[in-house]
Amino acid sequence: MFVTIREAEKLAKKKIRRGTYNWLISGAEDGWTNEKNLIDLKKIKLIPHILKKNYNLNLNQKFLNLKLNFPLVVSPMGHQTQFEKNGEYSTAQGAYQEDILSFFSTQGRISFDQIKKKISNGNIIWQIFPFGNKSWIESEIKKAENFKSSAICFCFDAPVRSHRYIDRESRYDARKFGKRTYEISPDPSFALKYDWDFIRWVKSKTSLPIIPKGLLNIDDINRCYKIGVGALWISNHGGRMFNSGITPVDILMQIQQMRGKTKIIVDGGVRKGTDIIKYLCLGANLVGIGRPVIYGLICNGSEGVSSILSILKSELITAMYNGGFKSLEDMKLERVIFTK
């Protein structure tokens, strides 16, 4: 069994077919934005404090109607049964074991109601890709309501499949691998037809908070805030969809005025505990974990997912002790230095 995330990645690469691994790690086009996520986090230095009397750490926070013990979430990721036979079931179970909020989506292989029926007590939020008409989207909203999703997340940054060179050069089609018990979204072309009225329409159909995911533009962020969303999710989709070079670090620095006004989720490039602290210092409330969770899933199903999250939690706590961070309130912008 692995004991670090980098060891989990090495083991995962050995365990699955080459095409599946390349599908997982690939970024849009030549992968520059994916790499930039990692680079920008590495450029941030953390300033430690000593003698902080930080023996009693506090990481609790309220998010929507949930009380969370750790500032981590499992990001929504599609086609999980290509990595492990039970796919989303195993990921949800692993997150539940570690008491971590998890997101699953309409691009997965297992529907929200099926996941919730199996892990009924898990903190799980449903994400909808707008790949259908309003009638279909409304049916997914009702599903989220009926099975007690705390919010509805929408993925807005992936209307079409991107050109990912590593993935395409493998001649691999993820849709052909792994079982499916949830039907494919009916019509992806609708994602290109919706505009800002779509969010207003969704708000008229549900009382659940709306979380737009894929925000990288200040104007878009301000519009979402004014409309009144439940949280802002800053993300470039793990660098998989648009090779812009814009990273969550860039955007968080431009929306410091949002701190305390609304909840902010961020993902992209997180591989260790100090990465989580860096994002929290930049203003995020919750930090999403993506590819490392799949490494754990590949290696050992739900136990592997649980181990990945346990490692990150342990690294976060250890870094807080050694860096002199007592609580989430200690995660401030003045605790970081940017290098060129």
Image: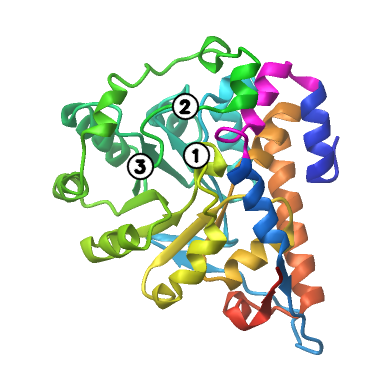
Nearer mark to the viewer, of 3 and 1? 3
**Amino acid type, residue under disc 3 in the picture:** Phe
Question: Considering the numbered disc 2 on the image, is that residue within a helix, a strand or a loop?
Answer: loop
Sequence-first tag of 2 and 3: 2
Residue 5, above or below 221: above
Please check the rendered image and state whether residue 79 is part of the magenta-colored stretch, yes or no. Answer: no
* Residue identifier under label 2: 108
**Amino acid type, residue under disc 2 in the picture:** Gly
Mark 2 → mark 3, Cα distance in angstroms: 16 Å
At x 75%, y 80%, the residue is: 324
Residue positioned most to the top? 176
* Residue identifier under label 1: 76
Number of residues whose C-alpha sits closer than 10 Å to that of mark 1, classed few (under 14), some (14–19) or many (20 or more) = many
x, y percent for residue 292: 68, 41
Number of residues whose C-alpha sits closer than 10 Å to that of mark 3, classed few (under 14), some (14–19) or many (20 or more) = some
At x 83%, y 30%, the residue is: 11
Question: Considering the numbered disc 1 on the image, is that residue within a helix, a strand or a loop?
Answer: loop
- Name the quarter where the N terminus is drawn: top right
In contact (CB < 8 Å): disc 1 and disc 2: yes
x, y percent for residue 329: 57, 80
At x 83%, y 33%, the residue is: 10
Mark 3 → mark 1, Cα distance in angstroms: 13 Å
What stretch of residues is rendered in magenta?
Answer: 15-31
Mark 1 → mark 2, Cα distance in angstroms: 8 Å
**Amino acid type, residue under disc 1 in the picture:** Pro
